[in-house]
Image (tube, grey):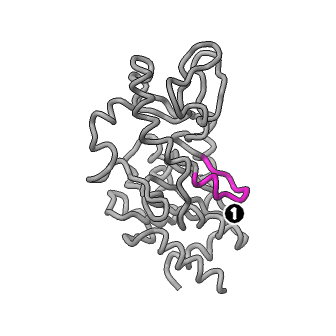
Amino acid sequence: MSRLAEHLGRARRVVFFTGAGASTEPPTSLPDFRSSTGLWKNRTLMQTLTRGTFFEDPEGFWLAFRDVFLPWKSVPPNRVHRAPARLAALGKQVGVVTQNIDGLDLRCATGYPVHELHGHLRTAACPECGTRVSTDRCETGLPTCECGAVLKPDVVLFDDPLDFEGVFLPARDLIGKADFLVVVGTSLAVAPANLLVLERRGMPMAMLNRDPTPYDEMAAVVERRPAGAVLDEALSALESG
């Protein structure tokens, strides 16, 4: 039995903390953001998807946002997204904290909590009156509210604050109650989301990431192989008894 399987087997409360790398694996196969081939290598795109651009040039913002992100709503989940549900079926208390906006962790959830730190692609909201609609209504043209304001996607853009009361603090509370943390597909480079993990120094942790991170020494288990395969092996061992 692998070290990951041993830790998962002993733990009662397990939280998965996921980043973009969790959704790069097939069949999801989305791009990440900060690798050598990530989306943010396109500086123009990075500068367009900001809070400032949304308010100053909403047409340019929506043209870029729609082209890059709305197709993500239809991608399938992979073994990483399904892993928490498999663990929950074994009787463990499970939760997910994700930096991803693709919604796949929530789609695979079986009743356990999922905290989406950076928002999601399901809805857009009016910054003036608060009306919220499905992003299905944002697939063409400039999406506007009945009050006339341009709708803003419910994701955290550059220069946007996190929802501390509604998302960040509940995520911190969830992680604080865990006795094992599985970090998947993130180098923990993005603040303040990374503080949720870094504040828990000393808690048993697995780091499943393609590249080394500055925090590997904190982890009891470090794996560079595809996280879906690593999790599948560990969960299959537990499921077989």
Disc 1 residue type (three-letter): Gln
Secondary structure type for disc 1: strand
Q: In terms of depth relative to the viewer, which is nearer, 74 or 224? A: 74
- Horizontally, residue 2 falls left or right of residue 45, namely right
In the image, is residue 8 above or below residue 139? below
In the image, is residue 41 above or below residue 28? above
| Residue lying at 42% horizontally and 41% vertically, measured from the top left | 68
In the image, is residue 26 above or below residue 49? below
Q: Is residue 236 magenta?
A: no
| Residue lying at 51% horizontally and 75% vertically, measured from the top left | 4
Specify the quadrant of the image occupied by residue 143. Answer: top right
> What residue is disc 1 on?
93
Q: In terms of depth relative to the viewer, which is nearer, 145 or 234? A: 145
Q: Is residue 108 magenta?
A: yes
Q: In terms of depth relative to the viewer, which is nearer, 127 or 59? A: 59
- Percent across and percent down for residue 201 are 46, 57
- Horizontally, residue 18 falls left or right of residue 135, namely left
- Percent across and percent down for residue 176 are 60, 52
| Residue lying at 66% horizontally and 86% vertically, measured from the top left | 241
- Horizontally, residue 158 falls left or right of residue 163, namely left
| Residue lying at 28% horizontally and 52% vertically, measured from the top left | 37
- Percent across and percent down for residue 163 are 57, 33
Q: In terms of depth relative to the viewer, which is nearer, 208 or 6? A: 208
In the image, is residue 4 above or below residue 145? below
- Percent across and percent down for residue 123 are 61, 35
How would you rate the neighbour count of disc 1 (Cα within 10 Å): few for under 14, some for 14-19, many for 20 or more?
A: some
Q: Residue furthest top?
A: 147
Image label count: 1
- Horizontally, residue 105 falls left or right of residue 24, namely right
Q: Residue furthest front?
A: 140
Q: Which residues are magenta?
A: 104-115
